[in-house]
């Protein structure tokens, strides 16, 4: 790790402004680190030429006194975001050769503010997975290892490449998408900070759609402050996404370091699962103590429909996915496998182009939306979703400002260790995060410690709609108390 | 509820995904495992509960009904597997 790759995003920003180093030097240091870390498979496409051209342009703007908020900051972009002229695959065979002719709104915001694209990061195919193992471009290996072991550990998923790239210092920050926990779970698994903003805070335009009523983009970074800086750039109104809210974007960085004295933090009793590991229970308790010491008031709250969030999610998400993924038909873009007639062409293209997990979810989605089953499954799941949201609303109405929960039910597991026999085993990873997507709320995962095997554990803070600022303030309190966790380089 | 092999074939066809005969049994088991998992939703009392249609309380924005994009056929077709002039090519649909 060089001096330049060990900087936080905020420190790099300040160093660039003071001309301690150039954007080209900063990009170079990261490109070199990426090259040396290919064994992690965090990047599915490196864009060194573009990175250096963008960095050069940044240096010119810095010298001209026209630097943007992210001027010269090298970032990684999850391969779910369309990037103009840069291959975007969603890590699926069906989009293996797709080169968008436009940028997503999020990435265009990043370039508007002067950020530099280092490359595209790996993810589960169409963001469907919790271990980055469904990627057509292969799994990602976490920079973290268990103490005294060289077994490959998963960085989590679906944004596994982004999380691993941030944790391994292969970028200063990265974008992710979160439909059921795909930012927060990998952040927790890799000792990084990740936030899923409120539904509607960030435009979904130009992001490969998975489940439109749940998908939301957010950043990964190594500090809460860096996450706040990135969220400000990514967020904002976009007329091209009708669900994107027309509301000013606060300067989230100002919330970092703000006192949380008098804040009421809810501790949802339903998140205390039977058979939960003692280490998770301990880190949660530790988090409560840190917040209390900083002046927050802790109150036990009840979210009675918590246990139904995951089953409802596994109806709503596949249903929306089956509809969104209908566009991959071998006609307008992507893979085409010839057939005797058009129907056979569709069927062969989709059978060959989608991986097993994606095919399974499309089929489940098709079934729950089909005639005769719609009411029993989809309608009921959407009713349960209303109840889940009402649980949160009742707590917020009673004066709770945010909630503290574990981010995941365990630390990261080995690559290939879970979900082989029963897909539900893998799905249970999202038990603490999925409620937040179902209710459209903001949630942040922040590193809180290491388990006995030396792997990171994270805590989650859940906020009121559009109150990301409280999450940044409270997460910073945890960060200050817990410290930072860096994987020892072995690659 | 659970699905049988015939239903798996029907769903696969509705989803336009070719399924080999040898895959049906395995897919049936996987789909049934999922359906068993979501079965617990049946115990929730949803009487009188509005199904969620929008997670954030906002009215859907509408834009003016005017042409604001277009005239970029090259870009639209640039990723198509088969094109001719400015058209997508598909296998013959009507006999």
Image: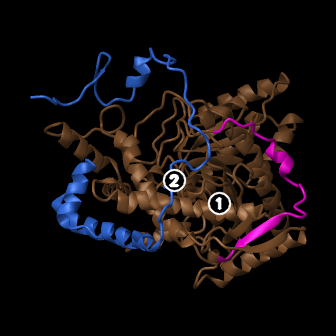
Q: Callout 2: residue from which chain?
A: B
Q: In terms of secondary structure, where does tag 1 sit?
A: helix
Residue in front for this viewpoint, A486 or A339: A339
Q: Quadrant of residue A109?
A: top right
Residue in front for this viewpoint, B74 or A476: A476
- Asked whether A265 falls inside the magenta stretch, the response is yes
Q: Which chain is blue?
A: B
Image x and y of residue B37, in percent: 41, 72
Task: Check if mark 1's residue and mark 2's residue have beta carbons within 8 Å.
Answer: no
Question: Share a chain, discs 1 and 2?
Answer: no
Image x and y of residue A387, in percent: 56, 63
Residue that numbered label 1 is attached to: A187
- Asked whether A141 falls inside the magenta stretch, the response is no
Q: Quadrant of residue A53?
A: top right
Q: Which residues are magenta?
A: A245-269
Quarter of the image that includes the N terminus of chain A: bottom right
């Amino acid at each position: 790790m060089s001096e330049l790759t060990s900087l936080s995003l905020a420190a790099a920003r300040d160093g660039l402004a003071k001309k301690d180093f150039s954007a080209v030097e900063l990009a170079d240091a990261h490109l070199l680190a990426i090259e040396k870390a290919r064994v992690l498979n965090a990047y599915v496409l490196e864009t060194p030429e573009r990175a250096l051209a963008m960095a050069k342009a940044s240096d010119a703007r810095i010298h001209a006194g026209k630097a943007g908020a992210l001027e010269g900051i090298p970032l990684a972009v999850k391969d779910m975001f369309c990037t103009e002229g840069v291959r975007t695959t969603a890590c699926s065979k069906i989009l293996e050769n797709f080169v968008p002719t436009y940028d997503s709104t999020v990435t265009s915001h990043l370039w508007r503010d002067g950020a530099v694209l280092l490359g595209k990061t790996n993810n589960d195919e169409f963001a469907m997975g919790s271990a980055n193992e469904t990627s057509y471009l292969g799994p990602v290996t976490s920079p973290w290892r268990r103490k005294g072991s060289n077994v490959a550990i998963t960085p989590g998923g679906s944004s596994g490449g982004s999380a691993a790239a941030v944790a391994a210092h292969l970028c200063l920050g990265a974008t992710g998408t979160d439909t059921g926990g795909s930012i927060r779970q990998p952040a927790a698994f890799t000792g990084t900070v990740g936030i899923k903003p409120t539904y509607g805070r960030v435009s979904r335009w130009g992001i490969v759609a998975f489940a439109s009523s749940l998908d939301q983009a957010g950043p990964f970074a190594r500090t809460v402050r860096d996450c706040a800086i990135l969220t400000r750039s990514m967020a904002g109104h976009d007329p091209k996404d009708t669900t994107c809210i027309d509301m000013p974007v606060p300067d989230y960085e100002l919330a970092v370091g703000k006192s949380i004295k008098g804040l009421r933090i809810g501790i949802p009793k339903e998140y205390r699962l039977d058979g939960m590991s003692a280490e998770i229970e301990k880190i949660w308790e530790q988090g409560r103590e840190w917040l209390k010491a900083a002046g927050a008031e802790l109150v036990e709250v009840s979210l009675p429909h918590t246990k139904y969030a995951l089953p409802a999610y596994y109806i709503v998400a596949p249903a929306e996915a089956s509809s969104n993924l209908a566009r991959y038909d071998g006609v307008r873009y992507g893979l085409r496998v010839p057939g005797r007639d058009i129907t056979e062409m569709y069927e062969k293209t989709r059978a060959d182009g989608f991986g097993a997990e994606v095919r399974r979810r499309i089929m489940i989605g098709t079934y729950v939306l089909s005639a005769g089953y719609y009411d029993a499954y989809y309608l009921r799941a959407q009713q349960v979703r209303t109840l889940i949201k009402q649980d949160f609303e009742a707590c917020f109405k009673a004066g709770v400002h945010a909630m503290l929960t574990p981010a995941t039910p365990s630390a990261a597991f080995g690559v290939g260790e879970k979900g082989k026999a029963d897909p539900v085993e893998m799905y249970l990873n999202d038990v603490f995060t999925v409620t937040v997507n179902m209710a459209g709320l903001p949630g942040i995962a922040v590193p809180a410690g290491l388990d006995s095997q030396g792997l990171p554990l994270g805590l989650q803070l859940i906020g009121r709609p559009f109150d990301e600022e409280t999450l940044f303030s409270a997460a910073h309190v945890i960060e200050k108390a817990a410290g930072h966790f860096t994987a020892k380089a072995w690659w | 509820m659970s699905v049988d092999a015939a239903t798996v074939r029907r769903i696969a066809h509705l989803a336009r995904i070719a399924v080999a005969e040898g895959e049906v049994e395995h897919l049936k088991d996987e789909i049934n495992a999922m359906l068993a998992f979501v079965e617990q939703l049946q115990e929730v009392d949803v009487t009188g509960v509005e199904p969620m249609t929008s997670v954030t309380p906002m009215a859907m924005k509408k834009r003016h009904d005017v042409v604001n994009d277009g005239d970029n056929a090259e870009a639209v077709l640039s990723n198509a597997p088969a094109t001719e002039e400015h058209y997508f090519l598909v296998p013959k649909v009507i006999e």
